[in-house]
């Protein structure tokens, strides 16, 4: 009987964990769709790798916010983001999609890593299509 309760408890913990990750991914997608760098930055790790068409570097959280804001502005503003693929591997999630801006489209890849109860953006790539 004790094993039964242990299984129920573990199953519940896994479901709650999956729900949190799903909600975080939805928030990240929402921020991309609206071009809201501030909302997106809530999920930045302490350091974030960002690759843009004209530059690539590893930034602190505060630097990354400014880089993404500048990128969104330089593209004439974000129109939307269309998710093409999502996957998970060993506690890490990745999203692949197309960021539509007023000045063009960018193939976008995001990598998030689960740390404790929260997923953090560790890498973002924006490549012109």
Image: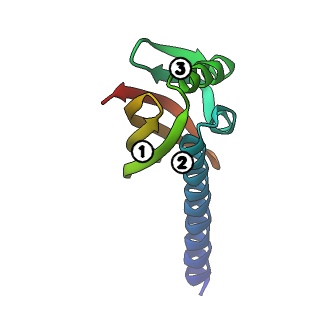
Q: Identify the mark nearer the N-term, 1 or 2.
A: 2
Q: Identify the mark nearer the N-term, 1 or 3.
A: 3
Q: Which residue is mark 2?
A: 29
SS for dot 1: strand
Q: Position of residue 117 (x, y in %)?
A: 65, 50
Q: Is residue 94 visible in this depiction of the protein?
A: yes
Quadrant in the picture for residue 59: top right
Image point 55% across, 76% down: which residue? Answer: 7
Left or right relative to 91: residue 12 = right
For the residue carrying disc 1, how many other residues have a C-alpha within 10 Å: few (<14), some (14-19), or many (20+)? some
SS for dot 3: helix
Q: Nearer the observer, disc 1 or disc 3? A: 3
Q: Nearer the observer, disc 1 or disc 2? A: 2
Q: Position of residue 102 (x, y in %)?
A: 48, 32
Q: Which mark is residue 74?
A: 3
Disc 1 to disc 2, how far (Cα)? Answer: 9 Å
Marks 1 and 2 close (CB-CB < 8 Å): yes
SS for dot 2: helix
Q: Which residue is mark 1?
A: 95
């Amino acid at each position: 009987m004790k094993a039964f309760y242990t299984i129920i408890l573990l199953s519940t913990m896994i479901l709650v964990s999956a729900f949190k990750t799903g909600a975080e991914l939805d928030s990240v997608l929402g921020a991309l769709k609206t071009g809201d760098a501030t909302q997106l930055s809530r999920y930045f790790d302490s350091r974030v790798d960002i690759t843009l068409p004209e530059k690539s570097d590893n930034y602190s959280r505060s630097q990354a916010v400014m880089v993404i804001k500048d990128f969104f502005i330089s593209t004439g503003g974000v129109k939307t983001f269309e998710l093409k693929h999502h996957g998970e591997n060993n506690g890490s999630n990745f999203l692949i999609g197309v960021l539509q801006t007023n000045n063009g489209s960018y193939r976008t890849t995001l990598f998030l890593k689960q740390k404790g109860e929260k997923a953090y953006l560790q890498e973002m790539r924006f490549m012109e299509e």
